[in-house]
Amino acid sequence: MNKHFLVTVSNDYEHLTGIEFMCSFFKRLSEHQVTLLHICRLDATDMNMALMEMWDNSDHRVQGRPTLGAQKALNKAVDLLSQSEMSVDRMITKTFAERYGKIKDILKEGSEGLYDAIILGKRASYTLQWFFERPADETAKALIGDSSLSTPLWICPEPEWGRKDILIGLDGSENSLRAVDHVGYILSKQNQHNVILLYVENGAGLDASQLFNQAADILKGHDIADKRITSEKTWGVSVAGTMMNYAEKGNYAAIAVGLQGNKQGILKDLNLAGGTTASLIERAESVSLWCCP
């Protein structure tokens, strides 16, 4: 089935970590679409210059008048994709000046464009971390609270080639099951990756066997065979720390979590998730983080 990914691109076109992660993760991505989103910050000192430096010869892949940085990012993305084992049916670039704040613009485009995932590169993920590390900041809380996030969010630091498989954190919430469904959907044609279901016992008293069976049924609905599914249960005071340790020891490519969980869940509430979310983002030097609403 055709999948459409929205990949954010900053002015730092030398570090397209979202595209780099996709190139390292996917082997076959035929008949899929990639949209590059380039936003010029309102507070950028060079904004006027950037908007004036429009590419003279715009091409058919670009929606809007591309800045010099957007065009360079597009060219590098095409080069990276052509050198990987991926194949892309369609790739376009959308570029515009910041409208409502960069994070709000990204989430708005993600919800309106019917994308299967929003992929944030290194610079965008650091911006997101800035918001979560300041939960008392009323402006940040207002931006996040009004965003109506409905698209899975992938936060991709510098990828480490050779990593594979996805670790999914289970906490009994509906969001964690949506994370399972998202991973199954993404990996349905990617047989090179397996799925590790992890339940971190932290006093919630949930039935781990029931959680594993429920998640396995969802994965099987996406044609993920039993041999590709592993279930792990452990105890941990810090859910984020325990998950990250598992991911590093297993050399996994990504961790998938539900964005809003139960009271004992992994990410309790988008507006107040600060500590756990910031910890996962800060710790993820080679592991990508997939957050599913």
Image (cartoon, helix red, strand yellow):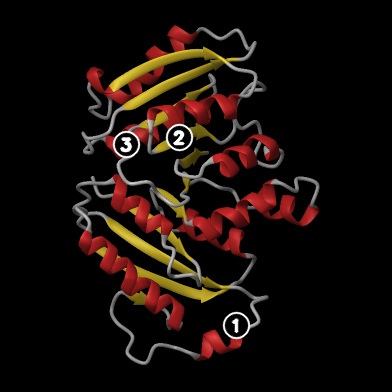
The amino acid on which the numbered mark 3 sits, given as a three-letter code, is: Lys
Residue depicted at 60% across the width and 82% down the height? 47
User: Gap between marks 1 and 3, in whole Å?
Assistant: 39 Å
Task: Judge left or right: residue 168 versus residue 127.
Answer: left
User: Gap between marks 2 and 3, in whole Å?
Assistant: 11 Å
User: Gap between marks 1 and 2, in whole Å?
Assistant: 35 Å
The amino acid on which the numbered mark 2 sits, given as a three-letter code, is: Ile
* Disc 2 secondary structure class: strand
Label 1 vs label 3, nearer the camera = 3
* Whether residue 89 can be seen here: no
**Quadrant position of residue 255:** top left
Task: State the image coordinates of residue 276 (x, y, percent, origin top left).
Answer: 64, 34
Task: State the image coordinates of residue 85 (x, y, percent, origin top left).
Answer: 19, 53
Classify 271 as above or below 49: above
Q: Are marks 1 and 3 in contact (CB under 8 Å)?
A: no
Residue on which the image places disc 1: 47
Q: Of label 1 and label 2, which has the lower sequence position?
A: 1
Residue depicted at 29% across the width and 28% down the height? 194
Mark on residue 255? 2
* Disc 3 secondary structure class: loop
